[in-house]
Image: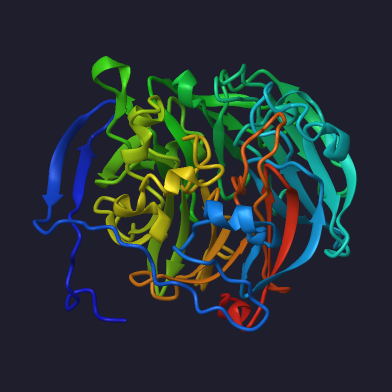
Amino acid sequence: MQGREDRPRPWRRLVVTAFAVGAVAAGTIVAEAIEDEPHVARPVPEADCGPGSRPETGLQGRVPKADYESGRAERGYLCNTRTVGHSGKSGGFKTLRYVDDSGRVCAYYDSNPIAPRDILGGMLEDGLGVVALDMSDPRKPRRTANLITPAMLAPHESLLVHQGRGLLMAGMGTAATAPGFVDIYDVSQDCRHPRLLSTTPSALFGHESGLSPDGRTFWVAGAAGGNLVALDIADPRRPRIVFSKFGVIYHGLRFSPDGDTMYVANIGSPGAGGILDGGGLRIYDVSEVHARTPDPEVRLLSELTWPEVSIPQSAEPFSVGGRDYVLETDEFIDLASFESIGRFRTAPVGAARIIDVTNPRRPEIVSDIRLQVHEPRNRTDALFRDPGNVSPAQGYAAHYCSVPTRKNPGLVACSMILSGLRVFDVRDPERPREVAYFNRPTPPRVGVVPEAGSYAMSRPAWDVRNQQIWYTDVHTGFWVVKLTNGVGRLLGR
């Protein structure tokens, strides 16, 4: 890798830093750095598909209408991947992997992405709520439990598990941020049969979430509810609020390894006409909350945005070569266009990017992770005739990405909705490239979720030892995908 002082910097960076901020939304914000050269987001290089692959037929990430008409789409698109196992017919926003104290391996996923709309979508096949799978044999996932307490019945994007403490948790929420019940389960003794520890109306409103590295603080972001809440779950039977703030519209909340720094996907602030603007990444010092300082302050360290920002979803931390990064993902298209069918065709697609956060006061975008179908010049009338691309709630856009390990991950995986599961080599964070993909679109159908194509929405989970990725598709359920043709050897260990 080139030295950072020697390489060209084709990025335009807008960073604002807050000094002496006493709370989340207070303080003096000043512009700290603007670089002159424009930031031009480009798609990553296409994957080189090896033996056993069934590659895409044209534009990177596209499933064209012609492939549905010829029957090609139903065969699926594989590039350096193959199917290991499959279960169910529905999925949602999170896929989790956990190993309990006895060495049993389990998966958890939410089965209905938006309640009440989808609550019956896969009931006959998957049951309701959060599904627990025994993954002793990944070729044959076996459903062992359905969690249907209030938050697990409708967790929206908040489902998380803490590997060290063996706690599975969620905050109740929908797109309208339903009342924020929080459920906490013990999965440490037998992950196949989670044991309920508490159900409490302690998060006000729910939507997305975050969990401190020590597993003792569960954060809930209310999104449309406009609230941020931190819960002390040191005693998971008695959660208690230790910090709350209204007037912020946040998505995912992720943390540095020491827990002092929080990386926030900021959806934006109310602007003219009620349209949200100013979205991007916010970085906070939350050390006082996690230290249980009385009347804690949460201090804004910096903000970062980018020209093609849509709806920031989450920012997953990782490190390479001693530098700290976050893998930030935007979902869908920008909110202003999302609300207008007449505008969404020309809306920017945020996709994903890698941001250097080694200095949390001066974050810097170092690369983009996006496909050819995300490019404005490719969003043509022909593209919008592809099945599944008629709605801004589906379409060619990203939703979640994840890393297999926090240190030197090697690869990252992203659910990119119609384009399916995509895998990228990030050993050089400044030059990511696509190395694999897996896409199993469905033909047009009528149902609770009537759209055609893939609806890959979930944050992928990783089985590093077996070089597998687990994820769910709203239309087709839970998938176990094996990396082939040597791609799995790029994983960090």
Which residue is at 61% across, 18% downward? 178
Residue for point 55% across, 25% down: 175
Q: Which of 425 and 347 is in front in this view?
A: 347
Q: In the rendered view, tell whether residue 485 sits above or below residue 87.
A: below
Q: In which quarter of the image is the N terminus?
A: bottom left
Residue 452 image point, x, y percent? 62, 42
Colour theme: rainbow
Where residue 101 appears, as percent x and y from the top left, is 84, 57
Residue 236: x %, y % from top left: 72, 33
With respect to residue 14, does 157 lie above or below?
Answer: above
Residue 372 falls left or right of residue 173: left
Residue 27 lies in quadrant: top left
Give 354 or 344, whichever is nearer the viewer: 344
Q: How many labels does the image show?
A: 0
* x 88%, y 40%: residue: 145
* 126 to 268, vertically: above or below: below
* Residue 172 as seen in the image, left or right of residue 166: left
356 left or right of 254? left
Image position, residue 149 (x, y; %): 79, 26
Quadrant into which the C terminus falls: bottom right
Is any atom of residue 92 visible in this view? yes
Question: Which one is nearer the viewer's eye here, 467 or 226?
Answer: 467
Which quarter of the picture shows residue 26? top left
The answer to whether one can see residue 244 in this image is no
